[in-house]
């Protein structure tokens, strides 16, 4: 049996799913981050799918979704943060959403020894917090520094999330994250939408 790859999990009709759920789709010709949360997922593993995608217009035909890159990611925090939340209100989990121009190429952990290039959150995103007692807050919107990043330079092929994500979208390899940034920079595009879906892959 062939191994499961992130690209093999991408279902047909994603563009229609996005439009049905959010009432619109990203602008044609603009790259965006499309994250598919695997349900049920395995806590602390990179088992969600991160796509660099684009809506393409076709002459005489309907628009279509073009996938430029498909990789394993996590959009959930490592389990270590469940009991040790950075925020006393609880650990943040990103929620299904279409967040326009919410990310811009910049630095993750700017000014720290582990700073590296990433997509920084610059506009509000939707999230819920898991409280230490196991209950959930209502859905909130705000800047929580839920960046899209990889591990520090030189780290490749992480298998466990651990402390690498307290609320972020994380790639398991630094080189993959750099490749994703290169795709955007080749198009001279520094900002990006985020579309996060759940319930479409398992």
Image (tube, rainbow, N blue to C red):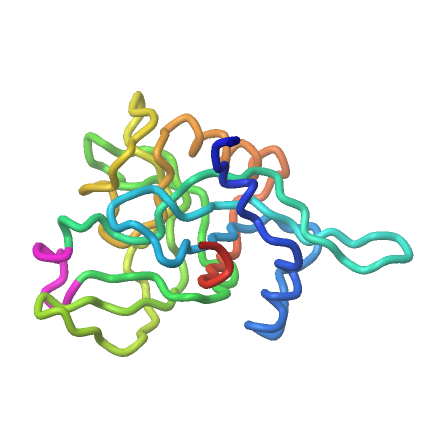
- Magenta region, residue range: 82-90
Which one is nearer the viewer's eye here, 106 or 53?
Answer: 53
Q: Residue at x 65, y 54 (%)?
A: 12
Q: Is residue 127 above or below residue 169?
A: below
Across and down, in percent, residue 7 comes to 55, 40
Across and down, in percent, residue 79 comes to 18, 50
Which of the 4 image quarters holds residue 159? top left
Which one is nearer the viewer's eye here, 92 or 10?
Answer: 10
70 vs 177, left or right, is right
Q: Residue furthest right?
A: 60
Q: Residue at x 42, y 40 (%)?
A: 72
Q: Is residue 195 above or below residue 105?
A: below
Q: Residue furthest bottom?
A: 138
8 vs 132, left or right, is right
**Where's the C terminus, which quadrant?**
bottom left
Q: Is residue 6 above or below residue 30?
A: above
Which one is nearer the viewer's eye here, 177 or 196?
Answer: 196
Q: Residue at x 61, y 33 (%)?
A: 186
Across and down, in percent, residue 1 comes to 51, 31
Name the chief secondary structure element in magenta.
loop
164 vs 88, left or right, is right
């Amino acid at each position: 049996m062939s191994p499961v790859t992130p690209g093999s999990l991408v279902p047909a009709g994603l563009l229609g799913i996005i439009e049905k759920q959010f009432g619109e789709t990203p602008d044609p010709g603009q790259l965006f981050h499309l994250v598919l949360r695997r349900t049920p997922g395995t806590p602390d593993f990179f088992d969600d799918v991160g796509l660099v995608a684009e809506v393409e217009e076709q002459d005489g035909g309907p628009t279509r979704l073009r996938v430029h890159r498909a990789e394993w990611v996590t959009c959930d925090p490592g389990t270590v943060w469940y009991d040790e939340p950075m925020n006393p209100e609880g650990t943040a989990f990103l929620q299904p959403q279409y967040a326009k121009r919410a990310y811009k190429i910049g630095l993750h952990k700017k000014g720290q020894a582990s700073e590296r290039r990433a997509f920084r959150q610059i506009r509000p995103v939707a999230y819920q917090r898991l409280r230490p007692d196991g209950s959930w807050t209502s859905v909130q919107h705000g800047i929580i520094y839920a960046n899209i990043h990889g591990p520090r330079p030189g780290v490749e092929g992480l298998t466990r999330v651990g402390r690498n994500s307290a609320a972020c979208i994380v790639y398991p390899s630094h080189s993959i994250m750099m490749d994703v940034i290169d795709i955007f920079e080749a198009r001279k595009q520094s900002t990006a939408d985020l579309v996060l879906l759940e319930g479409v892959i398992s």
